[in-house]
Image (spheres, rainbow, N blue to C red):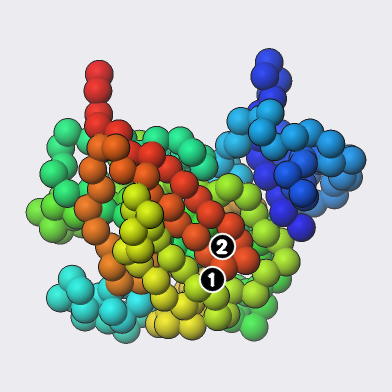
Amino acid sequence: MRIIRYQQPDSQPQYGWFTGEKIGPIEGDIFGAFQREEAKIPLSTVRILPPVTPSKIICVGRNYAAHAKEHGADVPEVPLIFLKPPTTLIAHHEAIVLPPQSKQVEHEAELTVVIGRRGRWITPEEALTHVFGYTVANDVTARDLQRSDGQWTRAKGFDTFCPVGPWIETEYDPADTVITCHVNGEMRQMASTRDMIFTVRQLIAFVSSVMTLEPGDLLLTGTPAGVSPLNPGDTVEVSIEGLGKLSNPVVAFSH
């Protein structure tokens, strides 16, 4: 099932399920008990929102060997994790804003796990029972600031630096699926999730050994090689086989 979060004119944001370009409202808690209504709202008549409102966004660095190599970095022996603030979130079709502090902002296409059940010290064997579904994300990064700062909070944390969506797919196998990123129609990244160093199960287990995972939290699983700069006027599209396409324009910062 595809879960979407949307807003109609003069209405509050809400969750729905999506099929055949139509949305049906969902009543109740998507992470608990809920009821689906008939899908009759045209997708074209609503504003698509980020698919969840997470308490935290956990990201994984250098989880593809080729991406580590392109930055001259070693492959980590344990998952390299960092956080993006929830204020980085934007939805499908919303604009990525290039901050004036950076001269080199890059895209990072990523498979993203949506946590559905609270957990701490989750074992790899039970990890998938804590997954609500999967979606598409772009871990936008100010590469020059990442290099100069040494730690990554500023480089990863600007507003608009985490496009996510358009929806969540609740029935999905992420073991061997193709991730691609195009900028202005030109392919920049392409790899399979089978190339990940640490699997989804391993990542959930590792992260939950550090912090409690809450329903709605996002876990970005790392990006393949091929990251490249973004410029004002670009359109960046991240596609994951079976999940859909996340598209965002790029604009310059203005007061």
10 Å crowding of disc 1: few (<14), some (14-19), many (20+): many
Rendering coords of residue 75 (x, y %): 27, 81
Is residue 240 left or right of 65 when viewed as pictured?
right
Q: Is residue 191 above or below residue 10?
A: below
Q: Is residue 137 above or below residue 221?
A: above
- Along the line of sight, which residue is nearer the eye, 126 or 37? 37
Going from N to C along the chain, the mark reached first, 2 or 1, is 2
Q: From where the camera sits, is residue 51 visible? A: yes
Rendering coords of residue 141 (x, y %): 28, 52
Quarter of the picture holding the N terminus:
bottom right
- Along the line of sight, which residue is nearer the eye, 153 or 89? 89
Q: Residue at x 71, y 49 (%)?
A: 3
Q: Residue at x 25, y 48 (%)?
A: 230
Q: Which residue in the structure is indicated by mark 1?
A: 204
Quarter of the picture holding the C terminus:
top left
Rendering coords of residue 238 (x, y %): 45, 57
- Given this view, does label 2 or label 1 mark the residue nearer the observer? 2
Quarter of the view holding residue 28: top right
Is residue 221 left or right of 227 when viewed as pictured?
right
Question: Pointer 2 and pointer 1: residues touching (CB < 8 Å)?
Answer: yes
